[in-house]
Image: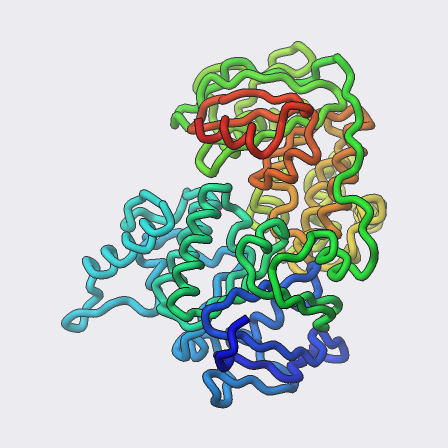
Amino acid sequence: MTTRSPILSLRGIEKSYGPIKVVHGVDIDIHPGEVVALLGENGAGKSTLSNVISGAVQPSSGEMTWLGAAYAPANPRAAMDEGVGMIHQELKLLPKLSIAENIFVGRYPMKSGRIDRRAMEDRARSGLKRLGLDISPDRLVEGLSTGKQQLIEIAKALTLNARLLILDEPTAALGGEETQLLFQQIERLKSEGVGIIYISHRLEEIRQIADRIVVMRDGAKVREFDTGDVPVRTIVEAMVGRSLERMFPTIPSPSDEVTLEVRNLASPTNAFRNISFSVRKGEVFGIAGLMGAGRTELVRAITGADPISSGEVFLRGEAVTPRSPMDSIRNGIVLVPEDRKLQGVILDHSIAENIAYANLADIAPKGWISSGRLHQFADEYIRKFGVKGRGRQNAGELSGGNQQKVVLAKWLARKPQVVVLDEPTRGIDVGARSSIYDLIMDLARQGVSVIVVSSDLEEVLGVSSRIMVMSQGKQAGILKREDANDVSIMELATS
């Protein structure tokens, strides 16, 4: 560990909202040229602490120093001016602006009193190239995949010339190749003396990227490790405050009966082509591949969210090729999308309302919605899926893991035959991940066919009976569980 003076010091930082204290007396030092992993379950206080450092939230008490001087940014702009940049877990891009405009929004390069668009696009193109993103900086953000939007957020941070970067789940939407490109940039920034606070639920990354680890639980700093080379089990037990016996539950054996079959499916945009596979009753079928391989586009097409140019979808031997999401829903095929905040829940509506929207036929069979019936129905599934919230509480107030449980609850209340989960644990802490894996296995035991799309190789290996690997829109191969490992998947994904 470096002996140089810290660029940032926190002493006794606390934050309360009314009587509720969410951060308790935290002391942390960040030195130049080091990566400090800030870990903990959702609700541990990581985001609040990061927001205090970046000026988005004012602490209730405590002191901070920056480069040896008192530091108390009134807002994110003030923190940015000091040299502190933050990449948020939740994407904050403006869809109607170009990539370059998003990267430089609020700090456009000027020339003769006007925006210097050539300089802006050249600098944006350079930042995108460093991350391996070959895309025109004058393209609108609207319509880009979640993974590409995440890379744009990172490119935005790389142009800040910051002395301290806070990266909140930067790889949540990235595949292995994109993650390695990001890590290369982090190493370059370290060599330039930039300090980095790295927040991630992908604990396998920590050994590779972190110099130190700080673990938070219930708003307090509970452990600090002076190396990133710490066993995952040790980190998890510090995060949850108990011994963790296992991460992935036992996978049940599927039946021989085929529930879902896809034959020669192709996309009109060429995002995928000639895809054929089947999923058996009670099987968890994984789909892996690098970002841009066509995984999300494929499952959106299967569930009617995206168009199909050719090919067919069969359910129990009957052709059900969808023309709309409603076609799939009526046939018992549902999708839990990768971006739960934009596509999964309505954040400013209640938990009960979110669950009700997919189940109005059961709640209001005669067309009239009774408040009592609505909350009775929702409360049943809130309990069943362990959602930590009340029916009348807005979904936006929940942690990521609990929002995901709400999305699962609303669709599983319909008792579907096929459940498609796109990045089911993206940005979710290890405790919530475990409960979602249990839910997946419960579905399989009940005879539901489950498709899991995941950028996390450990996850797709841990939950799947078989794994289809995609590469550049093509089906590279299907691996049985006993034949699948990191190497075999990556060989197919890069073929």
Pinpoint residue 40: horizontal percent, then vertical percent. 68, 61
Pinpoint residue 272: horizontal percent, then vertical percent. 45, 25
Count of numbered circles in the view: 0
Pinpoint residue 276: horizontal percent, then vertical percent. 54, 16
Q: Colour scheme in the image?
A: rainbow
Q: Residue at x 42, y 73 (%)?
A: 163
Instruction: Work out whether 480 lies above or below 129.
Output: above
Pinpoint residue 433: horizontal percent, then vertical percent. 71, 47
| Left or right relative to 188: residue 227 | right
Q: Residue at x 34, y 52 (%)?
A: 130
Q: Quadrant of the C terminus?
A: top left
Point out the residue furthest to the top here. 317
Instruction: Residue 280: name its quadrant.
Output: top right
| Left or right relative to 385: residue 69 | left
Instruction: Residue 124: name its quadrant.
Output: bottom left
Q: Residue at x 84, y 50 (%)?
A: 372
Residue 422 shows in this picture: yes
Q: Residue at x 63, y 64 (%)?
A: 213
